[in-house]
Image (cartoon, rainbow, N blue to C red):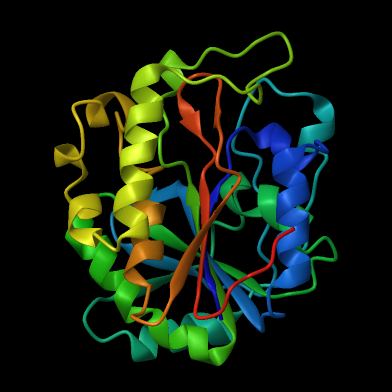
Amino acid sequence: MPVLFIGHGTPMNAIEDNSFSRKWNRMGEVLPQPEAILCISAHWETEASMVTAMDKPKTIHDFGGFPEELYRQQYPAPGSPRLADILGDKVKMYEIEKDYRWGLDHGTWSFLKHMYPNADIPVVQLSIDYTQDMQYHYNLGKELSFLRRKGVLIAGSGNMVHNLRLARPNEEGYNYEFAYEWAEKLNEAMKKKILTGDHASMINYHTLTQEAQLGIPSEEHYIPLIYTLGLQEPEDKVELFNDTIVAGSISMTSLVISNKTIHKS
């Protein structure tokens, strides 16, 4: 199976028909049909690595101040206790604990409802252990690579550049195309490192550019990208999509990593 990194942006992308949601919809059409989906979302941080293990994960509306329509959204995909068991049994380097309380947050369902609108594919989330460093997350990503051969689509969901404090939405929200110079410079530096396979520089992102501190003021939206890179294998190619900066300081740039070219047009 391919591997994804999704720049998910504002929760409004879940209900809007825009260039980002249309590309997610197209991705669902061109990717091989997964047996299950494992998502690492920026919005589930814990003090350990945990995986949702319930039969029916709830749809979590983990945001505030949005239109009522967004809160009515449900993504009733089944969970996969079996996949949670496999993770616990097969990942030897790190302990992954089972969780029965979380569910699917908007970092997961906001794009999946466009990719797989029937919500008929089992979905589990893997949490971000915020007590660990980047190398841990990269190594754990590598440990998950066996799932690709079991038909599991793995997706990291966050944003490469994500500074909400400096975001400058217009009257229509956060989706208008505008980039601060520093955000553009950092985004371009990241893409260059990703496309040349320089994962060490991405793990040590502080050394990328002087703008890294502005673009990554906290790491939760960046860490899912590191999982995705950890899953890349030598024969894989990287393709970019949704390569746009919005509201000045949020990069929607996304990746599909696969040993075959994915035709997205």
Q: Nearer the viewer, residue 236 or 172?
A: 236
Query: What is the x, y in percent for residue 79?
Result: 65, 73
Q: Nearer the viewer, residue 261 or 50?
A: 261
In this view, the residue farthest toward the top is 171
- Residue 48 sits above or below residue 146 on the image: above
Q: Residue at x 34, y 56 (%)?
A: 194
Q: Quadrant of residue 227?
A: bottom left
Q: In the drawing, does residue 210 fall left or right of residue 175?
A: left
Q: Is residue 59 visible?
A: no
Q: In the drawing, does residue 132 fall left or right of residue 161?
A: left
Query: What is the x, y in percent for residue 246?
Result: 57, 26
How many discs mark residues in the rendered view? 0
Q: Is residue 125 visible?
A: yes
- Residue 206 sits above or below residue 256 on the image: above
Q: Residue at x 60, y 31 (%)?
A: 63
Q: Nearer the viewer, residue 223 or 252?
A: 252
Q: Residue at x 69, y 80 (%)?
A: 32
Query: What is the x, y in percent for residue 24?
Result: 71, 54
Q: Quadrant of residue 264?
A: bottom right
Q: In the drawing, does residue 102 fall left or right of residue 226?
A: right
Q: Quadrant of residue 226?
A: bottom left
Query: What is the x, y in percent for residue 57?
Result: 66, 63
Q: Residue at x 40, y 34 (%)?
A: 161
- Quarter of the image with the N terminus in it: bottom right
- Quarter of the image with the C terminus in it: bottom right
